[in-house]
Image (spheres, grey):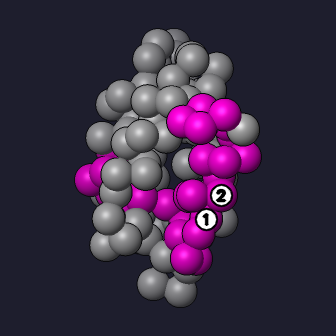
Amino acid sequence: MSEGMETPDSLWEVCTANKRLVPMPDPWNQLYGMLKNTRRKPSGGWEPPLPLILAAWDESMPIQKQLRFKEHLKWAEGQGQLQEVGAFLRSLSEEQWCHFGE
């Protein structure tokens, strides 16, 4: 990997280091707000689906949160935003991450 070039694998490694599950709700919402070309579907849902925060935070299993987060990373990759999203996620402090078992 070239220095500074984010790949899906390098980013996922950062996102799962130290038993990280997903960003805490505020930074996860910030990340979602960064995503380009999100859109409301005729059914009323969103593409990609919204982060599992607010009421969904307590209602969702850890694996559901992680799978949704991974959808957001794939969306970022498809929009050519992997570098931007990677820089944002790498800037988060450990306290800004939810960890497995918390």
Q: Amino acid at mark 1?
A: Thr
Give the CA separation, mark 2 to mark 1. Answer: 5 Å
Determine contact: label 2, label 1, CB under 8 Å: yes
State whether residue 98 is above or below residue 54.
below
Give the class, few, some or many, for how many residues have Cα within 10 Å of label 2's Cα (few <14, many ≥20). Answer: few
| Picture quarter with the C terminus | bottom left
Which residues lie in the magenta part? Answer: 2-29
State whether residue 101 is above or below residue 51.
below
Task: Compare residues 24 and 80 and report the one nearer the observer.
Answer: 80
Task: Decide if residue 64 is on the left or right side of residue 35.
Answer: right
Give the class, few, some or many, for how many residues have Cα within 10 Å of label 1's Cα (few <14, many ≥20). Answer: some
Disc ID at residue 40 = none
What percent of the width, then of the height, locates residue 43? Answer: 53, 20
User: Which residue is at a point 33% across and 31% down the rendered structure image?
Assistant: 33
Image quadrant in which you'd find residue 56? bottom left
What percent of the width, then of the height, locates residue 39? Answer: 46, 16
Disc ID at residue 13 = 2
Q: Which residue is labeled 1 in the image?
A: 16
What percent of the width, then of the height, locates residue 1? Answer: 72, 38
Disc 2, SS: helix
Task: Compare residues 3 and 39 and report the one nearer the observer.
Answer: 3
